[in-house]
Image (tube, rainbow, N blue to C red):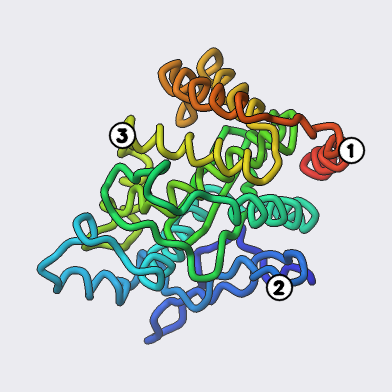
Amino acid sequence: MKFLKSLKNLTPKTTQKTTRRTTLTTLVAVAVGLSPFFLASCETAQEAPSVLADDLAGSTKSAAKVGLNAEQAQQVGREMSLAFLKKYPLLENEAVTLYLNNVGQYVGKHLDLGGKNIKCANKLDKVLPVKGFRVAAVDADEKVAVGLPGGFIFVSKGLLEGMKSEDELAGILAREATHIVCQDGLNVAAGEVNAKVFEKFFKKKLSRRQGKMADRGALMALYRAGYFPADYIAHMEAAVSAPTPGYTSTMERVNWLKKDYSKMVKKGVVNTQKSRVARFEEFKKTVTQ
């Protein structure tokens, strides 16, 4: 399958006495059996309020307290994705998208959904995306990785180019997937789903506990999926020594990860990196094409 429509220009054309609408068709092709990363018939956030926003505004309870169900989270995520892609254009490379979705869907199946090991910081119930996790790359040199409600995960070309292994990539995708499952950041969207939500989502820093639980979720998913968890720890440690705007880490988080990893080592960790080196190197070449 090929892209059916370019998303580089998301500003729709206007016609007299008509409401501007942007119908986004299938963004990318993914492996057989995987759902396509799809945004359908969303009104532009600048032109019309979301139906969901109206529903939330009329409710006596905010999303920050009760959370959203899977269908509502997907609607919020679609509109936030639209706003996100206005700032960061999609990297239109089918090979990259296919690879990202294969890794993201696989590691996503190994998330810890119980309440013992991963206790979501916001005390909301864990919610799996109704159509699974869908991953896409954006054409940006800066380091960006974000998980939006409903299972939408974006990573930037700049971040991908600096990665050293598939295991590292899987860890980042698992971290963002854990944020999504725990509904981290949904309070930002409570009562309003429009263009401003995107800015608020990024300006509001996640709590220390949210970061810790997402890191732990990534580590456990890697371990269960057969990836090498130490690569994700190395990635987070490198982010401490070489921070970039919008993408940082702390030694506190690294130390938490090392503590959790030490328990895994006692149970037995097998480094199977070599079996994935060749395909990851090919993937890196496609990123720069």
**Residue shown at the point (22%, 61%) measured from the top left:** 66
SS at mark 2 in the image: loop
SS at mark 1 in the image: helix
Front-lying residue, 250 or 227: 227
Three-letter amino acid code at the position of disc 2: Leu
In the picture, measured across the screen, residue 276 lies left or right of residue 116, that is right
Quadrant of residue 54 within the rendered picture: bottom left
Residue 278, x across and y down, in percent: 89, 38
Q: Quadrant of the C terminus?
A: top right
Label 2 sits on residue: 4
In the picture, measured across the screen, residue 191 lies left or right of residue 181, that is left
| Mark 3 neighbour density, 10 Å: few (under 14) some (14–19) many (20 or more) | few
| Mark 2 neighbour density, 10 Å: few (under 14) some (14–19) many (20 or more) | few
SS at mark 3 in the image: loop
CA gap, disc 2 and disc 3? 39 Å
Q: Is residue 143 above or below residue 12?
A: above
**Residue shown at the point (46%, 54%) measured from the top left:** 113
Q: Is residue 241 above or below residue 161?
A: above
Label 3 sits on residue: 207
Q: Is residue 45 above or below residue 209?
A: below
- Residue most toward the bottom? 17
Mark on residue 278? 1
Front-lying residue, 34 or 42: 34
Q: Quadrant of the N terminus?
A: bottom right
Three-letter amino acid code at the position of disc 1: Ala
Q: Earlier in the sequence, mark 3 or mark 1?
A: 3
Q: Earlier in the sequence, mark 1 or mark 2?
A: 2
* Mark 1 vs mark 2: in front: 1
Q: Are marks 3 and 1 in contact (CB under 8 Å)?
A: no
